[in-house]
Image (tube, rainbow, N blue to C red):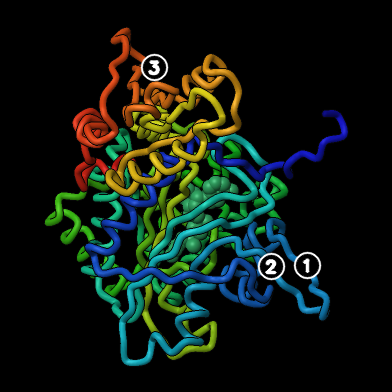
């Protein structure tokens, strides 16, 4: 094993006992996004580096130190997408989707950031995100947040989640606040850590996010962003709160909630779990009304969010909500290789008659004992045995692999009825939940 090639650090394999939970999480998102009028868009994993530099901001952690950037064979600088908003917006503009329309789009897939891996933080991770273009009002912001509440709490049943909201102001009010914040932090320059000193003139709002207790102590008395919001910002924020209350969405206002990407202005929000340790944000987003113009389009208001699928799967699994692994319901075992052809025919006719049934054929020969051992290891409930006597009189022996119920021999004609009674066809709701 020592010279076997291993996966890259921070890039995970998602194993068969985990994939049913992934399917379930993805299907809950998909169902609710569709109900709220969002349509799926599938986007490239690689974009031009310039797109992310312009959209996310040159002085952000992502662009400064986390992007997987490389020159392709033509010498063009390309980057594995670190997030989905920039590419979604690029596609909407390029494909004319914003022309006299207010599209609502969603996407899912892997994202890449060269961060220090730890629990809940990976270098390849998966997001499900949504973006709504063309509408400026707080009613849209509240609807989007209500949608995320429906997914996380009603759909996935996640508990102990807190919704934090904030308003970062428009670019003028944020500019005034930025100047006041710099002036305040300059007075404490020597107590700031190297990271905060570096950001002081480039991205001071991010200092509010510092995890360093010494910096936090300084921030405690920093000017309050909300004192710098103008009337329109204040009205928008009050409107958001009124709409959230009407929708029955509980929230906490966190005036220090800034976001790691530069494109945000106005409403921002995060859903945070206390059950995940340091990487507790499971879904986050906000408005980015200035970005469309920055990328080369006409001024177009926009808001969106993205959820971290690894973190949601971890929460759902820890809470015991993960659907069962999709082991076969039954396996078909043959007495000797002479019956392999009949077994193939029988298996296919059962699969045609019962489309939801998971039937595995124990192929590869071996003694009956060895085959039954393989059937048992597959996790199946039942073994269907096709031996000499069964082939002769067109019957099958049905043996329980899990319960001490002995075995019965029934005709192949009755088998379909028997299996459909043992393994009921899943309802739509169960199919959604268990991905069957
Ligand atoms: P973000 O806050 O960078 O926002 O990421 C959104 C979510 O992705 C995070 O809350 C977290 O759950 C997950 N996530 C981020 N980095 C990692 C990582 N290294 N490992 C595991 N999970 C991670 C955005 O990406 C914005 N594009 C969201 C958005 C859409 N805003 C407007 N529209």
- How packed is label 3: few (under 14 Cα within 10 Å), some, or many (20 or more)? many
**Are dots 3 and 2 in contact, CB under 8 Å?**
no
- Asked if one can make out residue 32 in the rendered structure from this viewpoint, the answer is yes
Q: Give the mark, 1 or 3, whose residue is nearer the N terminus.
A: 1
Q: Give the mark, 3 or 2, whose residue is nearer the N terminus.
A: 2
Q: Could you say whether the residue bearing mark 3 is in a helix, strand or loop? A: loop
Quarter where residue 20 is shown: top left
Q: Is residue 109 above or below residue 235?
A: above
On the image, numbered disc 3 is attached to which residue? 401
Q: Position of residue 301 (x, y in %)?
A: 36, 79
On the image, numbered disc 1 is attached to which residue? 70
Of the residues tagged 1 and 3, which is closer to the observer? 3
- Asked if one can make out residue 209 in the rendered structure from this viewpoint, the answer is no
User: Looking at the image, which residue is at 48% across and 77% down?
Assistant: 89
Q: Position of residue 386 (x, y in %)?
A: 42, 26
**Are dots 1 and 2 in contact, CB under 8 Å?**
yes
Q: Is residue 7 above or below residue 42?
A: above
Q: Which quadrant is the N terminus positioned in?
A: top right
User: Looking at the image, which residue is at 24% across and 50% down?
Assistant: 150
On the image, numbered disc 2 is attached to which residue? 79
The answer as to whether callout 2 falls within 8 Å of ligand 1 is no
- How packed is label 1: few (under 14 Cα within 10 Å), some, or many (20 or more)? some
Q: Is residue 395 left or right of residue 84?
A: left
Marks 1 and 3, how far apart at CA: 53 Å
Marks 1 and 2, how far apart at CA: 6 Å
Quarter where residue 284 is shown: bottom left
Q: Which quadrant is the C terminus positioned in?
A: top left
Q: Give the mark, 1 or 2, whose residue is nearer the N terminus.
A: 1
Q: Could you say whether the residue bearing mark 2 is in a helix, strand or loop? A: strand
**Are dots 1 and 3 in contact, CB under 8 Å?**
no
Instruction: Report the front residue among 42 and 261.
Output: 42
Q: Residue furthest left?
A: 246
């Amino acid at each position: 094993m020592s010279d076997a090639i291993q996966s890259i650090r921070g890039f995970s394999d998602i194993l068969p006992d985990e994939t049913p939970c992934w399917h379930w999480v993805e299907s809950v998102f998909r169902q609710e996004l569709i109900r709220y009028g969002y349509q799926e868009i599938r986007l490239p994993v690689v974009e031009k580096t310039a797109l992310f530099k312009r959209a996310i901001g040159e002085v952000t952690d992502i662009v400064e130190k986390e992007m997987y950037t490389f020159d392709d064979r033509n010498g063009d600088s390309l980057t594995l997408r670190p997030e989905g908003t920039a590419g979604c917006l690029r596609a909407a503009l390029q494909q004319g989707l914003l022309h006299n329309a207010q599209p609502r789009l969603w996407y899912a897939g892997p994202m890449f950031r060269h961060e220090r891996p730890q629990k809940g933080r990976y270098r390849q991770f998966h997001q499900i995100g949504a973006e709504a273009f063309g509408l400026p009002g707080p009613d849209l912001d509240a609807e989007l947040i209500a949608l995320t509440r429906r997914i996380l709490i009603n759909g996935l049943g996640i508990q102990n989640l807190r919704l934090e909201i904030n308003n970062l102001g428009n670019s003028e009010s944020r500019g005034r606040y930025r100047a006041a914040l710099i002036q305040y932090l300059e007075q404490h320059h020597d107590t700031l850590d190297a990271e905060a000193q570096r950001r002081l003139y480039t991205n001071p709002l991010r200092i509010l996010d510092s995890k360093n207790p010494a910096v936090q102590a300084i921030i405690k008395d920093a000017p309050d962003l909300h004192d710098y919001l103008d009337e329109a910002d204040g009205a928008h924020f009050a409107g958001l709160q009124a709409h959230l209350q009407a929708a029955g969405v509980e929230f906490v206002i966190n005036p220090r909630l800034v976001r790691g990407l530069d494109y945000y202005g106005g409403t921002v929000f995060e859903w945070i779990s206390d059950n995940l340790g340091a990487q507790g944000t499971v879904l986050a987003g906000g408005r980015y009304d200035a970005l469309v113009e920055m990328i080369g389009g006409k001024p177009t208001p926009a808001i969106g969010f993205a959820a971290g699928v690894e973190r949601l799967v971890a929460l759902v699994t820890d809470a015991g909500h993960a659907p069962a692994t999709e082991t076969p319901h039954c396996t078909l075992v043959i007495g000797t290789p002479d019956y392999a052809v009949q077994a193939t025919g029988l298996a296919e006719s059962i699969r045609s008659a019962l489309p939801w049934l998971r039937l595995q054929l124990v192929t590869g020969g071996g003694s009956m004992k060895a085959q039954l051992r393989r059937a048992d290891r597959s996790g199946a409930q039942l073994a269907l045995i096709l031996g000499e006597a069964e082939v002769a009189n067109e019957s099958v022996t049905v043996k329980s692999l899990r319960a001490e119920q002995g075995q019965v021999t029934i005709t192949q004609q009755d088998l379909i009825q028997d299996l459909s009674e043992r393994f009921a066809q899943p309802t739509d709701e169960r199919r959604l939940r268990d991905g069957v």
